[in-house]
Amino acid sequence: MSLTPKEIKFEEEIKILNGIYSDMLEAIHAKPDTTNVEELNNYFGNVYGILNRTALRVKDIKNLLERDKKFIHETWNAPA
């Protein structure tokens, strides 16, 4: 039984993307307003960790999409 495009769901992918979005917002809002080198160093260390986690999540999304990929070999032709 093949899935039609209307039946394809992306719950797992959306959940992962929501996590990425939350991490990005947290990194943006956590930026220190100071020139304190130690605070900036901590901030950049945290951003580096978020980037690593984001890269792994993007890879997970890609793998999920490839695993669930269904080839639909039909074309839709409008009536003449």
Image: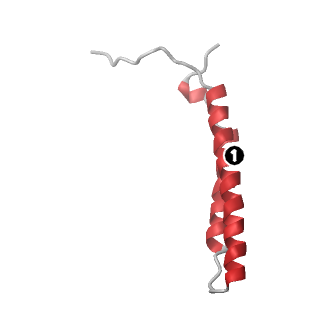
Residue 79: x percent and y percent?
A: 31, 16
Number of labels in the image equals 1
Residue 73: x percent and y percent?
A: 48, 14
Specify the quadrant of the image occupied by residue 33.
bottom right
Q: Residue at x 69, y 46 (%)?
A: 56
Q: Is residue 16 visible?
A: yes
Q: Residue at x 67, y 78 (%)?
A: 40
Colouring style: secondary structure
Element at label 1: helix
Residue 28: x percent and y percent?
A: 61, 70
Q: Is 23 on the left-hand or right-hand side of 71?
A: right
Specify the quadrant of the image occupied by residue 41.
bottom right
Q: Is residue 9 visible?
A: no
Amino acid under disc 1: Leu
Q: Image height check: is 26 above or below 16? A: below
Q: Image height check: is 35 above or below 77? A: below
- On the image, numbered disc 1 is attached to which residue? 56
The quarter of the image holding the C terminus is top left
